[in-house]
Image (cartoon, rainbow, N blue to C red):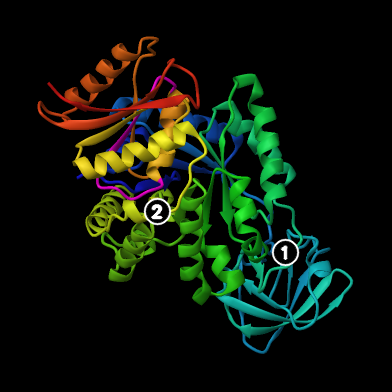
Amino acid sequence: MTRATKIVATLGPASNTPEVLEKMIRAGVDVVRLNFSHGKAQDHIDRATMVRAAAEKVGKSVAIMADLQGPKIRVGKFENNKIELVPGAKFILDADRTELGNQDIASLDYKELPRDVKPGDTLLLNDGLLVLTVEHVRGQQVHTIVKLGGELSNNKGINKQGGGLTAPALTGKDMEDIKTAMSFQCEYLAVSFPKNATDMEMARQLANVAGEPYRHKPAMIAKIERYEAIPHLEAILKASDGIMVARGDLAVEVGNAAVPALQKRMIKMARELDKVSITATQMMESMIVNPVPTRAEVSDVANAVLDGTDAVMLSAETAAGRFPIETVEQMAAIALEAERAEFVTLDTDFAGRQFGRIDQSIAMGALFTAHHLGCKAILALTESGSTALWMSRHRINVPIFGLTSQPVSMRRMALYRNVTPLLMPEFNDRDAALAAAEKILVDRGVLRPGDTYAITCGEPMGYPGGTNMLKVCRVG
């Protein structure tokens, strides 16, 4: 059984060598995340080059996702790098302060905070581990009382419970980072903290302009981590190519208890709108220091798989953890086991649905036919990857292979659930293309003599959106 759910892994000090990266790809990594919150432009360019080389050496399609930092809503640095906040104590957040902080006061990276809060508001620091209640605002100073104390160290994040921070999704740094990401033609660009569809549309325009010299347009991923984004989920999804359920900041803003239901809702909505979804944050957190995950983490990953997510993501586990390779191996094993328990509901999926496009109708017809005939595989000959994407939106126990002559489309399909992307030569003749596709799958050991498979393509060949043929074949 081929694993359907994809794995996104973040590069960092623990995985930033060709040797470790190659082992991670062999262990199951499908998408490599470059976190633009850390490192310089040249660091990311060098890492992208390393990813491409490692993927080619392993012989696997691997996509690159550039993850923009977004607005820095953080406290500044402290005289001794950290302080201890005591419940009931007064603490000031000062947007004008340039000196190092101390036990009573801290500077802010986010200068708009005094205008965004009012007495009674709750501020959550360091992913909600510390809680402050706003007492009053005086000029550029936010005076608070510590409700839940603990250690506060340099540059920890700030969230406002219930949302309401006006920071724009795209900063000046992000705009420069988009140019860097386009220079190595990342397949996916993840936008942090979008509040609405306009944020995503602006990011797409900037990326398309920056990518024009390279004739490249990345797929856009909206990271859902703001309270304000929830009422606009459908519009944000329609303006994007996919979403990331970024459970860290989201949980701080909406409350931990609300996140599991939101996760399920977002993944379901993404599938219905033919978009991809990534489930992220603390999936295997304990494996930063431990060689095995907790039972709760195993259940968390398995539940995301059963929800229908396209991919599960690793952050610090592979960027800074002690066991990056083992973490990927464990995640792959959990996903595969969860998929064995999936229930296929294709017939009910299609009931009452209408397909206005020929290529989309062909994709759905291939799924239905392959499922009921017990085909060994579905082969989608595709220029853009759209046919494979549509097929991947439905649960089916038949593996889907996206065959394309376009390297960018091949790498982009690396994120699609239950799709194995393969590169094949460009053909003008339909029969030659079909024969070549069958040979690729036979050579890989997927198909054997006597096996049946479904195959889709477009005629004439080579036009995106031109899939208009479905054929059921038997290997001779």
**Dot 1 lies on which element?**
loop
Mark 1 / mark 2, whichever is N-terminal: 1
Q: Position of residue 18 (x, y in %)?
A: 36, 33
User: Which residue reaches farthest right?
Assistant: 139
Q: Is residue 204 visible?
A: yes
The verdict on residue 413 being magenta is no
Vertical arrangement, residue 280 with respect to residue 51, above or below: below
Q: Which mark is residue 100?
A: 1
Provide the major secondary structure of the magenta segment: loop
Residue type indicated by callout 1: Leu
Residue type indicated by callout 2: Ala
Q: Position of residue 417 (x, y in %)?
A: 37, 45
Residue numbers of the magenta segment = 393-406
Residue occupying the point 37% across, 47% down:
7
Q: Quadrant of residue 88?
A: bottom right
Which quadrant holds the N terminus? Answer: top left
**Image side of residue 158 versus residue 30, left or right:** right
Q: Which mark is residue 351?
A: 2
Residue occupying the point 54% across, 28% down:
185
Relative depth, front residue between 52 and 44: 52
The verdict on residue 399 being magenta is yes
Query: Which of the two discs, 1 and 2, sits closer to the camera?
Result: 2
Q: Quadrant of residue 339?
A: bottom left
Residue occupying the point 36% across, 56% down:
348
Vertical arrangement, residue 435 with respect to residue 222, above or below: above
Q: Which mark is residue 245?
A: none
Relative depth, front residue between 176 and 228: 228
Relative depth, front residue between 101 and 220: 220
Q: Is residue 446 visible?
A: no
**Image side of residue 52 versus residue 395, left or right:** right
